[in-house]
Amino acid sequence: MPLTPDQQREIEALRAESHTTRRATVLALEKILYQPIPILDHGLIRVIDYMGDDGAVVQAARVSYGRGTKRVSEDQGLINYLMRHRHTTPFEMCEIKYHVKLPIFVARQWIRHRTANVNEYSARYSILDNEFYIPAPEQLGAQARGNRQGRGDTLEGAEARHVFELLKDDSEQLYAHYAEMLNEDESGRVLDPARKGLARELARMNLSLNFYTQWYWKTDLHNLLGFLSLRADPHAQFEIRVYADAMLDTVKRWVPMTHAAFTEYGMGGAHISTKGLAIVKRLLAGETVMQEESGLSKREWRELMQSLGRED
Amino acid sequence: MPLTPDQQREIEALRAESHTTRRATVLALEKILYQPIPILDHGLIRVIDYMGDDGAVVQAARVSYGRGTKRVSEDQGLINYLMRHRHTTPFEMCEIKYHVKLPIFVARQWIRHRTANVNEYSARYSILDNEFYIPAPEQLGAQARGNRQGRGDTLEGAEARHVFELLKDDSEQLYAHYAEMLNEDESGRVLDPARKGLARELARMNLSLNFYTQWYWKTDLHNLLGFLSLRADPHAQFEIRVYADAMLDTVKRWVPMTHAAFTEYGMGGAHISTKGLAIVKRLLAGETVMQEESGLSKREWRELMQSLGRED
Amino acid sequence: MPLTPDQQREIEALRAESHTTRRATVLALEKILYQPIPILDHGLIRVIDYMGDDGAVVQAARVSYGRGTKRVSEDQGLINYLMRHRHTTPFEMCEIKYHVKLPIFVARQWIRHRTANVNEYSARYSILDNEFYIPAPEQLGAQARGNRQGRGDTLEGAEARHVFELLKDDSEQLYAHYAEMLNEDESGRVLDPARKGLARELARMNLSLNFYTQWYWKTDLHNLLGFLSLRADPHAQFEIRVYADAMLDTVKRWVPMTHAAFTEYGMGGAHISTKGLAIVKRLLAGETVMQEESGLSKREWRELMQSLGRED
Amino acid sequence: MPLTPDQQREIEALRAESHTTRRATVLALEKILYQPIPILDHGLIRVIDYMGDDGAVVQAARVSYGRGTKRVSEDQGLINYLMRHRHTTPFEMCEIKYHVKLPIFVARQWIRHRTANVNEYSARYSILDNEFYIPAPEQLGAQARGNRQGRGDTLEGAEARHVFELLKDDSEQLYAHYAEMLNEDESGRVLDPARKGLARELARMNLSLNFYTQWYWKTDLHNLLGFLSLRADPHAQFEIRVYADAMLDTVKRWVPMTHAAFTEYGMGGAHISTKGLAIVKRLLAGETVMQEESGLSKREWRELMQSLGRED
């Protein structure tokens, strides 16, 4: 677990707090509030705060004076309807805040989601920790053939071992040189009083993209689902997908009705194009349709057949 | 007070709720949670939900595992520093949600602040209430002379009385015709079973801009302060300023340190231009400076002298 | 045509200009640049400026030093791929600016699209024109039965005539009273020198939501397509759909490849849910599936059958 | 100059293009369109496209049918007024697009400005170039004492030489290992046919933050000025400030009136706080004011005295 005893204590202190509030409160989420969920070798996510629940979605859709909720089945029906018909604004009425520790190359993908609030640990101001990501053996994928931006088979044997060594040795060397240039160690102790030490804002550039950074990241439920639909997708890079998967679990705890609707209408299912629909209609009418005369490219045809469960 | 007994009851039910939470909780804001604050003749704001407190600003600035707060004076000092140097992202870590009832022409100014989440009562879907804004006598300003987008002296006597009558009679007539076209009254009862009734999405166009609408409006603390610095400003139109003033009070309850810093460095004070600063330096050096040779336009000169307390 | 001779002259002057540029230039869009396209009874849209073309999408996707385009079929293939897989950022690299004249109730729907830049004609500062929207006879829909936010049959006979009269008479009366309160006519001439005249920022509240306003509206191609997919949709209110339809035509002139991809993968086609896909698979396997045992609500079932062309 | 002959040719081809357009066109900006402006040791910016000019700001403020511009002095006066009173929306009516090549640690600061459109070169998809940033000797600052996030004296002698060597050797080693893991060289040629090669999305994590990336970055004039006011500021890190300075020059070519107003009212001048204004008034009244009794902290006092040109 990537926590120091001090951090552990700080978290425990927060978890021990208990306040009385009139606000909508979600027991299943309170249970894990502040608690670190380990991701990768040194990463984590923690839910730090939240606003609203499934009822807040319903309440906003109805612009009511009170809670706005009715029977559970009606509320679920309304949430399904909103999700299906892209009435997205009621989902913006819930907000969540995470503390995330993640490799810099993952942070660089993540930050592209702009409708969020972010405070990142500043390496201009502070010294970064000596923590870097080394993929687990089963994650050491070779470059994919078909998909230029994915990974294929797993590297094995000597090639795998060599990659591990290069990654590990380089990271260790970089951090040692980082400290040497700073003329400070991880805890801020001066190494050689005769030297000045390079500015932090410069020395950090010697660290590689697998070093861990951390940030507070806050967003509304609608934009969180947008993030998850892209990053919990099988096409997303594994190292960001594991974060998205863990966040999807927190969404399930927080807003179970919205999570169900999202699974059914958001992430699940498939968008079928105009030509694709025409082909489905022909197939339903009993016709045989071949890719060559379908008007679809080979790739589109394959994607459509996958959606229809007709891969062969 | 613009509430029906049903609405009153719904609010009381929410206020009677009491939950246990590990989240940061602000007692002074809890006190007024859900409670309507009357604005204008039929309007209101209510704080519906909130996330975070002054500590959340500090915590985000320090990207800490725990609460992040230290001694009160240190926290206030950090918040002042952040405000003064435009380090705005920590203030985005707090979120607040209001329920607002407001005239449509005010809503049209308000909605221009885009970094917010909004759910408005739908007049395509529902029938609007028969509530419209009539200015109080002391608000019946004549067109300003100097400032083409403001109001000057108050209208008096026959002219004022005539304006009142026009506004009131027209609004009443419009609502009567609205109901007649809908073939429904305010409560949704059909007026004449022999008629079909015009679609709601069309009939609403006969209502004037002083009719009240309502919405849920949610934003982060940084963008809220941006809204308030423009809308609680003396140059803002009175009818939106009264909302901003009431919201500023809720900010004081919610995040008193941030409110203090905002008063000192945000809304208070003045931005002095390059030429303005040069003039201040000359004045401090004991020189006499005249507008004509200052390089400032008359209007800029007047604004500068006001900031320096040198109006004559 | 809703233009004064002065406006006509100003537009002609702009259309007569001719500059030499190194920027990507689209002949089909230049042809209609600045030209008003009439919408509804007094509205219009005009393309005022644009940046980029289909090539700019391709260029951004390839982050190239040059134009980035290859053969037409490759460029279309890349654009289709980007659209299909929600790689939206390259479409943000094109920008367009419209001048729009539209009824206020349409403007209120439109402004909900926040990722755009807007400058609206200010009724605090200027006097609004005496122009209001009266629906054409075939647009006078009754309230829909099935869909609470739509319109159904067209009103006819005495009821239709009465609605027309109410709308027209009320609008005329409101404008007359607006001028009377201002103590100015449409051209700014003072009516009665003995009166002060109500401030513009107040008098405007007596106008109804069918009065026309105008604005400059600028957005990027990705967000424009988002706007169009909601507002050119059959479920959108007729009065905004006619604007969206006209804008869709300008998109076709501007970026024909993106327009084709949008038609095929964006607006066209359908999103099938998880349960929906399971039903399609059963149907393709020759099974008979009934709504009752499908797991879909009646409404969802009807929507799915419509997508599959199986309405009966 | 960091360009290959192919890139050079592509740029020349674009610069040789000449189109006729009705759009507002800015000669001074056309002159440098597409042309790389070198920054740091391997970086560059290029203006790739633009929309609008100073006239577009004026036109939007007036919501006019024609160009909207009047006499030059009136236009400058209006632009000054808009800038001074934070009427920001007219400045959003101009748009500019840059191609930027920059070290990753600079890109990480830059991307925090969210109201912009970005397409970055993908290291999941392509192989990064062997180009990394090594500070010039005069930029090798030691950690600042007073300001924890800045740099102070320049390192000298043996310490400086050692830092150079560490940075250079580490970067070269990392790229060599990157290629070795990929089993490909910079041009994509396979090194050892017996090996599979690590996926690009993984191998990139071995590169350090001083490696160069590149992107297309597009934003509106208002948000560009916001970016520049923070990043062309003396407190910004040198390595991003050099980009901001070069962009400020392009703004001067593009919209000279807006640039003048920004210099006078935006970047120039100073914001004086409530307490600060009270002190200025006392000073102007001839009083002596000491920091201790001023109500300002030492740091605030120093900042105020600097603004007033009273440092001693």
Image (cartoon, coloured by chain):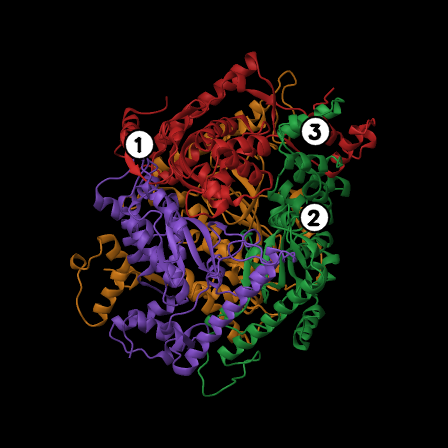
Chain colours: A red, B purple, C green, D orange
Task: Find the distance from the CA under tag 1 to the CA under tag 2.
Answer: 52 Å
Kindly tell me whether residue A98 is visible in this rendering: yes
Which label's residue is closer to the chain start, 3 or 1?
A: 1
**Residue that appears at 27% across and 76% down:** B287
Q: Mark 1 lies on which chain?
A: A
Quarter location, residue A118: top left
- Residue B146 seen anywhere in this rendered image of the structure: no
Residue type indicated by callout 1: Glu
Residue linked to disc 2: C54
In the depicted structure, whether residue D18 falls above or below residue C182: above
Q: In which quarter of the image is residue A21?
A: top left
Q: What is the x, y in percent for residue C256?
A: 73, 49
* Residue depicted at x 68% and y 75%: C9
Which of the two residues, D98 or C165, is positioned nearer the viewer here?
Answer: C165
**Residue at which label 3 appears:** A303
Q: Tell me the element at label 1.
A: loop
**Chain letter, disc 3 residue:** A
Judge whether A276 appears above or below C235 on screen.
above
Q: Is the Cβ of the residue at disc 3 closer than 8 Å to that at disc 2?
A: no
